[in-house]
Amino acid sequence: MVKKTTIPKNISKYEIKRTLGHGSMGTVYEAFDPFVQRSVAIKIAHNYDDENPQLAQKSRDSFFSEVYAAGRMHHPSVVAVYDAGQLDDLNYIVMEYVDGYSLQEYVTGDRVLTSNQVIDVMYQCAKGLDYVHRQGIIHRDLKPGNIMLSNEGEVKIMDFSIAH
């Protein structure tokens, strides 16, 4: 069972601005890093209550395996991880903020890509996945909702929560 937690205005030094989305492992917020003066994305893991400590531990382990997997990646087509930590009962990961839309928006929404844009997106995804695989990581949840396309046309593979 997930605890209902009120999200504070700040997580560590990061000022929470708005909710970006919800996933199986947590909720993602846009935030601001006042030290480097940039927007970031913060994923806060779902918090499980103490009724099932094994489930809570499994959830924490999965969350921090994402931090480990994604934090090792340094490639233009993979979202960058800047920080991670625990604050009281919250586990969080701080990532590059991508100003754009997930590919899911192009699959089911009103957004359209030209043929040349589709080829470019496929090429960038292939380059990013090649890099990830050469690092010994298997994403295991690659889908349009886990690939961002920035407003500048840059692909960013994200959500390594179940990576192996």
Image (cartoon, helix red, strand yellow):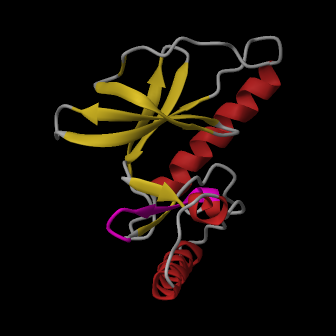
Residue 132 drawn at (x, y percent): 54, 72
Residue 146 drawn at (x, y percent): 59, 57
Q: Is residue 56 magenta?
A: no
State the residue in front, 88 or 77. Answer: 77
- Magenta range is 145-153
Left or right position of 5 against 124: right
The N terminus lies in quadrant: top right
Q: Is residue 150 magenta?
A: yes
Residue 4 drawn at (x, y percent): 65, 12
Q: Relative to 68, is 107 above or below?
A: below
Residue sitting at x 56%, y 76%: 129
State the residue in front, 136 or 8. Answer: 8
* Rendered image quadrant of residue 2: top right
The C terminus lies in quadrant: bottom right
Residue sitting at x 69%, y 14%: 3
Q: Relative to 67, is 153 above or below?
A: below
Left or right position of 98 against 5: left
Residue sitting at x 39%, y 66%: 74
Q: Relative to 160, is 126 above or below?
A: below
State the residue in front, 121 or 82. Answer: 121
Tell me how many marks there are.
0
The residue at the far front in this view is 110
Residue 150 drawn at (x, y percent): 39, 62
State the residue in front, 108 or 31. Answer: 108
Left or right position of 123 against 47: left
